[in-house]
Image (cartoon, rainbow, N blue to C red):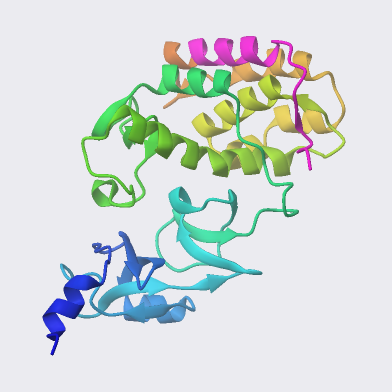
Amino acid sequence: MISLAVLLLAVPRVLGALNGACTANGTPGVCLTTSTCSSGGGTSHPGFCPSDPTDVQCCTATCGSGGRCEFDTSCTTGNIASGLCPGPTGFRCCLPAAGGSCGAPAVNAATLSLIKQFEGFVASPAPDPIGLPTVGYGHLCQTSGCSEVPFSFPLTESEASTLLVSDLRTFQTCITNDINSSIRLNANQYGALVSWAFNEGCGAAGTSTLIARLNNGEDPNTVAAQELPKWVFAGGQVLQGLVNRRNAEIKLFQTASSVIAHPPPC
């Protein structure tokens, strides 16, 4: 007869702390109090957050149309919706790819290189220039100790690259959704905007004059050259690193490419 202890050891599971990532029976979740989970429409699963009090359990939930709640970093479709899931900011609704095969395209190698250059590689969580905890290539920690990251620290550069590609899905999606489908952007123009959104945030990008001018049909190269240099402030002061990054993004934006990234190819 197989003992209960042996059976438990045979079942792979991911353990987490309060507001940290967990996995319950193969479904991603977040460690929350049972009351918070229930009020947010989730289901609590005991035994997956053992370092916390009894009422802190792994919370899983479905959301939207065919979506499930998980941390942004594990959403493979890049189609993420806010306000539909219980828990911390980074635990959101991961929906099926918009339009089936017409989801937001991945950025090109030139964009990845630019982002890595300016974010820099950080193997273990540490404050960035304005004091926010980050790791890898600019991953902003969503939980204490960056527990949502699916790798142990210190990261390798390969793991950091994988994390970056995952993180960028959110920003690829918001740039794709914010810009009218009638606006054509090549892969370098699109990539430069994703780099900018990754640095400044989807909210700031979506309400920007830059996006508004593109949607009004103005010349993309002119808009980028005039608007990107405005995004060089942090804490009310100009940062030379942001000046350099915006210049690099403008250069990438104005580099010709025959590959059309927006609207997304189907």
Q: Is residue 233 visible?
A: yes
| Residue 32 is covered by the magenta coloring | no
- Residue located 26% across and 64% down the image: 18
49 on left or right of 102: left
**From which residue to which does the magenta span run?**
243-266
- Residue located 57% across and 27% down the image: 196
- Residue located 59% across and 16% down the image: 249
Quarter of the rendering occupied by the N terminus: bottom left
- Residue located 72% across and 54% down the image: 100
List x then y, in percent, for residue 13: 27, 66
List x then y, in percent, for residue 16: 25, 62
| Residue 255 is covered by the magenta coloring | yes
List x then y, in percent, for residue 217: 87, 27
Quarter of the rendering occupied by the C terminus: top right
Residue sitting at the far front? 1
* Residue 170 drawn above or below residue 23: above
* Residue 58 drawn above or below residue 240: below
Q: Is residue 53 visible?
A: no
User: Looking at the rendering, which quadrant does residue 194 occupy?
Assistant: top right
240 on left or right of 99: left
> Which of 185 and 133 lies nearest the eye of the viewer?
185
Residue sitting at the far bottom? 1
List x then y, in percent, for residue 2: 14, 85
* Residue 262 drawn above or below residue 52: above
> Which of 147 and 38 lies nearest the eye of the viewer?
147
153 on left or right of 38: left
Disc tally is 0
User: Looking at the rendering, which quadrant does residue 14 occupy?
Assistant: bottom left
227 on left or right of 162: right
